[in-house]
């Protein structure tokens, strides 16, 4: 009996081992076939090899109701690409944008197993990955497809003259305002800073929340702080921190921080903001509780039929932060960049079929039609140069028209601070300093000094 | 067959699969973590730069790291000082309940099978300043709304309460099993001798379940040292880093900043601290509780 049992055990072990080995075996076989295909085997096997299924993993950040439209566009591109390449299936993996950028993708890059295609942040992320050879060089592909000169800027994704990522759309930042409320008050979008502050005070006195706020993640309040310091200290000052030409504790920077704090102290933001998620930011505005919301132009997609802000269609406007008296530099400048897009794993180049699939994906994703769809359906500004007449005829939405007007009337623009300073400094300002400022645990002067200290440390590490 | 079992090579063969798995998933990660903790490495490049103990010096002299250590300390204090007595109290109550014992057991166990993400969101609603349950209750007593998760004063406490709520049920079920396994005669004999319920609980049940309480405490300590998910879901370590624990500190300052060398040194520190704490606990306290023999 004992003997029998051990024999059974041995047999089952052999069975398990052979199963495992056969699993490895089939894998080797397919890899071998892929390699052998180009060596000129019989046409029959070549056909069979072409039809052999293979998979591309695609990490996107289109999760949640507000990104449904963008997700639909991506799905169409995926379907079209699958139709054009025999045997190809995409495996979609949706991850929240900030988590993908700051945790997941970084971990995967470190472990050496990023997805084949992934949502990628231009500067500074793509440069770090490109430097280490983790990203696929797209220069030959976009040259072959003839789209190299079609993008308004590829700078954030360029490293040593080569392109490692393609921006999906552009964005700008400014104030969304409740038009109905403004009309009722007989107001127009503020032309001067004093006028804006008068309006904020009046809204507060009216028992409403002047500005939506959700600062659990520091980048949300920092959109406005970034604009404030670009008014007070100049739109190009952020460029100069990493080179040491300018300092975070510059008196004009401190003035900007002080202004943000003054607005917090006066109760112009939704109270308890440090505990709210970004999703609640939009809700505060769409529910009519907050009258203004400082956010990126991507938010306009919410004010479309079937989306969470559908009830406010036609009742939302957009304006630029008014000029500050005594401010430095261009007082019409606003944040505008093309920093978000797709990157591809350098491992793709090892498999000719995957490389071909990537090429077709790029062809289907980065073209005029998709850019217009992004603009019309999702409110994302095009990252590619489009014909002015085509652009004009495709914008029918009032809010989008107003956004484009505001962007066009700005004489210059600046990139968001986190694409210009080192990751250490971004962590310091967004996880600590801005929350301290809002939570009344620091002063604007101390904040400037702490940031400058972090900046100097980061600069010294780079030398 | 018997001959075969006398062959030492066969034993080696049998333990080999386990040994390989152990080496692959336990020894190798620890060794490589220690190796990388001595380097300056962005996590992506192929040549980490050896910098000796600089990472450890940096962590140990960083005020924010100690804030995180302190918060881990709060986790331990809260779970050992408040949670464990509650666990014992509720276990005693449930053990002596006559009706619906199964329902109580299931009800207290429920939170521990839910994912932390769900619990974080659930309690996020309870702590919500405007419409949350807690502030609504406070309003009845005329107390101004408190900003539970956004005020530095209450944020850590809010997390601790949620964490305790999540795990109490799990430990209650463990302690309950121990109580139920105590021979009934002991309790009955004491009752016949005229001992009150409180006396029986303190003099009979508690001493007999000491070993399991000791295990609960040790698991709480280990759990407290590696806490991260609940903090990430509820506050992301904020406001302004005031609720960061060691693990979230590691994510924030290492992974998001392309500093994997530094991150590895933090992970080594967490490992060492946990090792020291549990070893101390075992040596000083758990050893003393004698074996129970009925």
Image: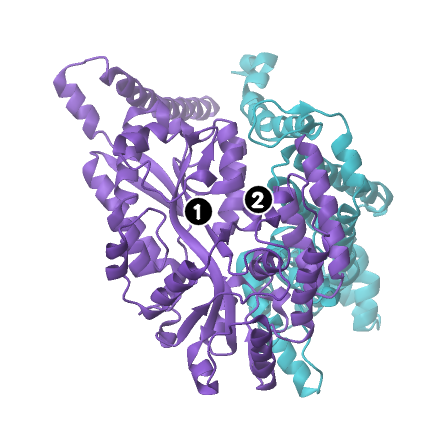
In percent of the image, x 69 and y 27: which residue is there? B39
Residue A448: x, y in percent? 73, 54
- The tally of labels here is 2
Q: Looking at this rendering, what residue extends furthest in the left direction?
A: A44
Secondary structure, mark 2, is: loop
Q: Residues within 10 Å of mark 2 (few under 14, many from 20)?
A: some
Quadrant location of residue B255? top right
The answer to whether residue B290 is left or right of residue A345 is right
CB-based contact (under 8 Å), mark 1 and mark 2: no
- In the rendered structure, the colour chosen for chain B is cyan
Secondary structure, mark 1, is: strand
In percent of the image, x 77 and y 29: which residue is there? B53
* Residue A237 visible in image: yes
The chain coloured purple carries which letter?
A
The answer to whether residue A295 is left or right of residue A312 is right
Of the two numbered discs 1 and 2 on the same chain, state the one appearing first in sequence.
1
In percent of the image, x 47 and y 29: which residue is there? A134
Position of A236 relative to A284 (above/below)? above
Quadrant of the snapshot with the C terminus of chain A: top right
- State the mark number for residue B186: none
Residue B288: x, y in percent? 86, 45
What residue does disc 1 label?
A340
What residue does disc 2 label?
A420
Residue B239: x, y in percent? 68, 60
């Amino acid at each position: 009996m004992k003997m029998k049992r051990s024999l059974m055990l041995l047999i089952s072990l052999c069975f398990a081992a052979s199963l495992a080995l056969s699993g490895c075996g089939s894998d080797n076989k397919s890899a071998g076939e892929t390699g052998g295909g180009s060596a000129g085997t019989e046409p029959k096997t070549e056909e069979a090899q072409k039809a052999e299924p293979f998979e591309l993993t695609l990490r996107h950040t289109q999760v949640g109701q507000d990104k449904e439209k963008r997700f639909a566009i991506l799905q169409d591109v995926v379907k079209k690409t699958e139709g054009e390449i025999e045997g190809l299936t995409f495996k979609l993996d949706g991850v929240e944008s900030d988590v993908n950028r700051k945790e997941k993708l970084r971990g995967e890059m470190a472990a050496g197993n990023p997805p084949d295609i992934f949502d990628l942040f231009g500067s500074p992320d793509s440069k770090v990955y490109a430097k280490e050879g983790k990203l696929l060089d797209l220069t030959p592909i976009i040259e072959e497809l003839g789209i190299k000169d079609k993008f308004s800027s590829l700078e954030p994704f360029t490293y040593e003259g080569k392109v490692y990522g393609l921006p999906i759309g552009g964005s700008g930042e400014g104030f969304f305002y409740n038009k109905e409320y403004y009309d009722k008050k007989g107001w127009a979008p503020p032309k001067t800073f004093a006028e804006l502050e008068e309006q904020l005070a009046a809204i507060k006195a009216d028992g409403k929340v002047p500005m939506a706020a959700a600062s659990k993640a520091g980048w949300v309040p920092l959109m406005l702080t970034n604009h404030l310091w670009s008014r007070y200290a100049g739109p190009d000052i952020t460029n100069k921190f990493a080179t040491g030409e300018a300092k975070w504790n510059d008196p004009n920077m401190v003035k900007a921080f002080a202004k943000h704090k003054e607005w917090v102290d006066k109760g112009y933001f939704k109270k308890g903001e440090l505990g709210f998620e970004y999703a609640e930011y939009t809700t505060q505005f769409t529910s009519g509780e907050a009258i203004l919301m400082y956010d990126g132009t991507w938010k306009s997609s919410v004010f479309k039929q079937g989306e969470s802000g559908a009830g406010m269609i036609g009742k939302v406007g957009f304006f630029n932060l008014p000029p500050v008296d005594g401010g430095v530099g261009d007082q019409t400048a606003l944040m505008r960049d093309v920093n978000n897009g797709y990157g591809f794993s350098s491992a793709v180049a090892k498999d000719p079929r995957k490389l071909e699939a990537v090429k077709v994906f790029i062809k289907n994703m980065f073209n005029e039609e998709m850019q217009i769809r992004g603009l019309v359906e999702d409110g994302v500004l095009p990252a590619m140069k489009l014909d002015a007449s085509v652009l004009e005829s495709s914008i029918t939405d009032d809010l989008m028209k107003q956004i484009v007007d505001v962007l066009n009337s700005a004489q210059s623009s600046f990139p968001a601070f986190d694409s210009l300073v080192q990751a250490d400094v971004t962590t310091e300002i967004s996880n600590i300093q801005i929350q301290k400022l809002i939570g009344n645990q620091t002063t604007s002067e101390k904040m400037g000094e702490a940031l400058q200290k972090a900046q100097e440390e980061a600069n010294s590490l780079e030398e | 067959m018997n001959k075969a079992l006398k062959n030492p090579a066969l034993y080696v063969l049998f333990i080999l699969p386990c040994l390989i798995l152990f080496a692959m998933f336990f020894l190798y990660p620890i060794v490589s973590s220690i190796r990388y903790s001595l380097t300056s490495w962005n996590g992506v490049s192929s040549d980490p730069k050896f910098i000796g103990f600089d990472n450890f010096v940096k962590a140990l002299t960083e005020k924010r790291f100690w804030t995180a250590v302190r918060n881990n300390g709060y986790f331990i204090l809260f779970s050992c000082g408040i949670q464990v007595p509650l666990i014992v109290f509720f276990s005693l109550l449930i053990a002596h309940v006559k009706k619906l014992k199964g329902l109580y057991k299931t009800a207290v166990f429920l939170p521990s099978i839910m994912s932390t993400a769900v619990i974080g969101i659930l309690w996020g609603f309870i702590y919500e300043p405007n419409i949350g349950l807690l502030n609504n209750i406070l309003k009845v007593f005329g107390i101004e709304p408190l900003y539970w998760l956004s005020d530095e004063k209450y944020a850590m406490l809010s997390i601790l309460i949620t964490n305790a709520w999540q795990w109490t049920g799990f430990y209650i079920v463990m302690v309950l099993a121990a109580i139920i396994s105590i021979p009934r005669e002991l309790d009955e004999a004491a009752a016949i001798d005229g001992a009150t319920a409180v006396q029986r609980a303190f003099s009979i049940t508690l001493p007999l379940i000491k070993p399991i309480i000791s295990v609960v405490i040790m698991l709480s300590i280990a759990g407290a040292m590696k806490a991260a998910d609940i903090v990430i879901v509820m506050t992301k370590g904020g406001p302004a880093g005031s609720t960061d624990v060691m693990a979230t500190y590691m994510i924030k300052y290492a992974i998001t900043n392309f500093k994997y060398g530094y991150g590895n040194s933090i992970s080594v520190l967490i490992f060492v601290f946990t090792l020291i704490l549990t070893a101390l606990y075992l040596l000083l306290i758990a050893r003393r509780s004698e074996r129970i023999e009925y």
